[in-house]
Amino acid sequence: MAEGRIAGEQVRVGIVGTGFVARLRAEALQTITGARLVAVAGHSAADTEVFAQQYGAVALKTWQDLVDYHDLDLVMVCHINRDHDTVAAAALHCDRHVVVEYPLALSSEAAQPLLSLAETKQRLLHIEHIELLGGTHRALKTHLQAVGQPYYARYCTLAPNRPAPPKWTYCPDLFGFPLVGALSRLHRLIDCFGPVARVYCQNHYAGFYTGPDAIPYYTTCLCTAQLTFATGLIAEVVYGKGADVWATSRRLEVTGNQGHLCFEGDQGTLSDADGTHPIEVGSRRGLFATDTAQVIDHLLTGQALYCHPAASLYTLQVATAAQRSAATGRVVEVA
């Protein structure tokens, strides 16, 4: 992708959102001499004003005001998943570079035109996938050859939450289908094992109620998918959260014809013909700061980024296929 570079020594940044990720982005920008947070727009005027004062930025009423703001090079989209594609498209049309948290959109069909728009506008469209920067993923890729030919993988993340919070992440309309909203669960595996041939998915919601915004929220979600990769490898993905999830789990394992890798929490082991051995797993801390610094460096110097938007779009195509499978009860072929 041919992208316009920033003229000058500093990237002027606007942030859409005032939540957890937006704060991590703002804190990271304060440590980078080549960037300056200029403006912010959030859902609540009061929260936006407090956020802007804390980080020395201008508080704007709406995201539309922010993407139109005259003094910006880069827009960081850090709010509800449902609106990612809308805000990203508006920012690109205003000739801004764009960073957006995954997913780019709630379907691959909605996301595809944005890559073409960024190409036409010669602007950066970077979709954050910090799971690729974390210690677990780096350790997995470092030791993957030790298992020989991998034929099975399983990735399970379960998060009990009682009572389930009335947050947008528990709303299908705002968060998206579970494996779309939690796209990293698929992206990590696809980064390691390549294209997916077919997917079969099942999804369970429980405890639906109507929120104050008159749209449905749930208290429990459990989504499972079986992926058959083009190589023949079979992978199982389990994602669950909420009130009826009773045990915490963060476990990733890969089995091959010469060994087995297992990552549980922040610990890793390799089992092979010589026994089971611990392996070093790096930290998960500071990944948004790393991502932010890489984006600024890319815009100022042209240094390559760690993830191309086409890779995220492909994973979103697999997630969209999983959503169709859950809706129809059928195996779905991935183009």
Image (spheres, rainbow, N blue to C red):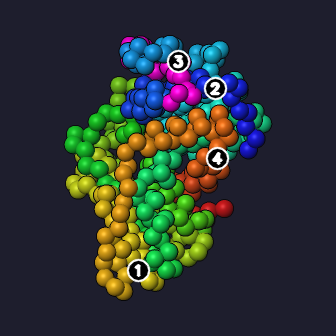
**What residue appears at the point 21 percent right and 43 percent down from the top-left corner?**
162
Tag shown at residue 9: 2
> What amino acid type is highlighted by mark number 1?
Gly
Query: Which element type, helix, strand or loop, lies under badge 3?
Result: strand
**What residue appears at the point 61 percent right and 53 percent down from the top-left corner?**
311
**What residue appears at the point 22 percent right and 40 percent down from the top-left corner?**
163
Q: For residue 4, what is the image quadrant?
A: top right
In the rendered image, which residue does mark 4 sit on?
304
Neighbor class of circle 1 (other Cα within 10 Å; few <14, some 14-19, many 20+) is: many
**What residue appears at the point 23 percent right and 56 percent down from the top-left corner?**
247
In percent of width and height, residue 266 lies at: 31, 57
> What amino acid type is highlighted by mark number 3?
Ala
Which callout, 2 or 4, points at the residue further toward the start of the chain?
2
Which callout, 3 or 1, points at the residue further toward the start of the chain?
3
**For the residues bearing labels 1 and 2, Cβ distance under 8 angstroms:** no
Confirm whether residue 327 shows in the render. no
Neighbor class of circle 4 (other Cα within 10 Å; few <14, some 14-19, many 20+) is: few
> What amino acid type is highlighted by mark number 4?
Ala
Q: Which of marks 2 and 3 is in front?
A: 2
| Relative height, residue 59 to residue 116 (above, below) | above
Q: Which of marks 2 and 4 is in front?
A: 2
Tag shown at residue 137: none
Tag shown at residue 259: 1
> What amino acid type is highlighted by mark number 2?
Glu
Task: Kindly report the distance in space between the C-alpha atoms of the residues bearing marks 4 and 3.
Answer: 26 Å
In the rendered image, which residue does mark 3 sit on?
39
Q: Which of 50 and 172 is in front in this view?
A: 50
Task: Kindly report the distance in space between the C-alpha atoms of the residues bearing marks 2 and 3.
Answer: 18 Å
In percent of width and height, residue 71 lies at: 63, 16
Query: Which element type, helix, strand or loop, lies under badge 4?
Result: loop
The magenta segment is: 32-49
| Relative height, residue 25 to residue 324 (above, below) | above
